[in-house]
Image (tube, grey):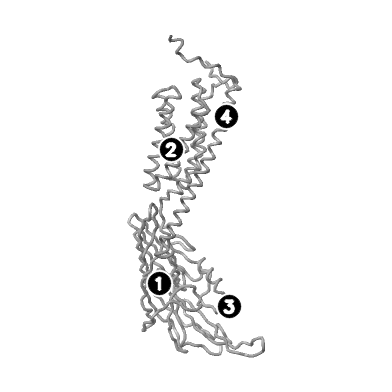
Amino acid sequence: MSGIMDPPPLPPRTGSTAMLKILAIGILGCCLLIPLLLLGGLVEERATRRDQVVAETTASVGAPQTVGGIVLDVPYEVPERNPNGVVTLVTRHAYILPEQLSIEATLAPEVRRRSQYTAIVYRTAIKMRGTLAAPDVAKLAPDATTVHWDRATVTVEIKDLRGTLAVSPLRWGDREIALEPMNETSVFAHGVRGLTPLTDDATGPRPFAIDLTLAGSQSLRFVPSGKATEVSLSSPWPDPGFTGAFLPANRTVAPTGFTATWQVSYLARTFPHTWLSTATSVDALDQQRTASSFGVNLVQTVDQYQQTARAVKYGMLFVLLTFTIFLLWELLKDLRLHPVQYVLIGCALVVFYLLLLSLAEQMAFALAYLIAAGATVVLVAAYSASVLRAGLRGAFGIGSWLSGLYGVLYVLLRLEDLALLVGSVFVFLVLAVVMYLTRRFDWNDMRVPA
């Protein structure tokens, strides 16, 4: 009876059938690339949805803010001949930026949650001080007939006026000037302005001061409008991303926050200090000022979608490496695994990324990764204990291999500059191990020499 119940012996393996098996497993591995690509699209879709929710959340608070200092606008008249030959007086404008500009800002960030998504918003208190001198209109525009010093205005550039919580009166010399939103075309597209009349004999720089309280989101930038611009910024946010045309001259970053100081000369920027409305277009000036701006991004160091997308990119490599281990076990132990069993193992490896994506939306990425990887390792190891006919020993071996794979993947996800180096060394070591295990393998009849 025992002879009847025993399974029949395995037929001898031939080189041709084994090579067909290897080819079939390779094709199955390539087929699993399809669900991996679909998972990559799902990650991108979820990231796009996150961006939409963040945009909706920050829209009610304020956009990324840019504070551009102030500019003095002096209108003047010049004679111009129209196409009919009639000479008329046309109003033009001369602009000048501050001699000195000092900005002191304190940024208070706040993380707002909507569903499983988070958005960074902030409030910033800004103290702007400096000096500003009247332009030499006679030198800038020799053909000017009349200069309207009494209609001179000062404009303060604020990118998103919706985030303007408070604006103090402009202290202009010994006077206080009330500021109002711009209601006409100006050198700046957005901001507040006020009438700052001068006299035709105005000489020397005039001190000014203004305090702002602004709300914004994600980033805060400044434009170096002065001949000498100094910006001091502090915040309790621990992960600043300094960006723009100039990096801080001094900075301190700690878990409790950061402080940074910029010092910029007008010689280093790309826009002029004084100009005429006829000489520089508003669009060109805006582009030049944007290119010269600098500031800080409030960085969220853990982006679950970015890290999940990076993990999916390694998915095909992980499937092929796992299939290689099972194939080696099959060849070295003279086992027979059905292609369906390879498909099930591959599907388990692919489902790991789906688990990772869904869990990372609800908890910290590290914990989500641990749960998804642990569940996948247990599932594949338990299945391997049966199909490899190796019991707990085989399950432990496969589980250890998968644990090592997921450990290496997590290290690669956490690394930035060294990810390529570590990944290359890991693949080299795996290849070396495979070559070592098969060094005595007879590939002609697919047998291990006795």
Q: Up-down: is 175 above or below 223?
A: below
Q: Residue at x 39, y 55 (%)?
A: 118
User: What crowding class fits label 3: few (fewer than 14 Cα within 10 Å), some (14-19), or many (20 or more)?
Assistant: few
- Residue 211 image offset from top left, x and y in percent: 36, 73
Q: Is mark 1 on a helix, strand or loop?
A: strand
Residue situated in front as seen by the camera: 218 or 287:
218
Q: Name the residue under label 1.
A: 102
CB contact under 8 Å: marks 2 and 4: no
Q: What residue type is labelled 4?
A: Ala
Q: What residue type is labelled 3?
A: Ala
Q: Are marks 3 and 2 in contact (CB under 8 Å)?
A: no
Query: Which one is nearer the viewer's eye here, 392 or 243?
Result: 392
Per the image, label 3 sits on a secondary structure element best described as loop
Measure the alpha-carbon separation of dots 1 and 3: 28 Å
Label total for image:
4
Q: Nearer the viewer, residue 101 or 220?
A: 220
Mark 4 lies on a secondary structure that is helix
Q: Separation of disc 3 and disc 2 at Cα?
A: 62 Å
Dot 1 and dot 3 residues touching (CB under 8 Å):
no
The residue nearer to you, when weighing 276 against 183, is 183
User: Which of label 1 and label 3 is nearer to you?
Assistant: 3
User: Image height check: is 121 above or below 31?
Assistant: below
Which residue is identified by label 3? 279
Secondary structure under badge 2? helix
The mark that comes first in sequence, 3 or 2, is: 3
- Report whether 430 appears left or right of 173: right
Label number found at residue 24 = 4
Judged by depth in the image, the label closer to the viewer, 2 or 4, is 4
Q: Mark 4 or mark 3, which has the lower sequence index?
A: 4
Mark 2, residue position: 406
The label nearer to you, 4 versus 1, is 4
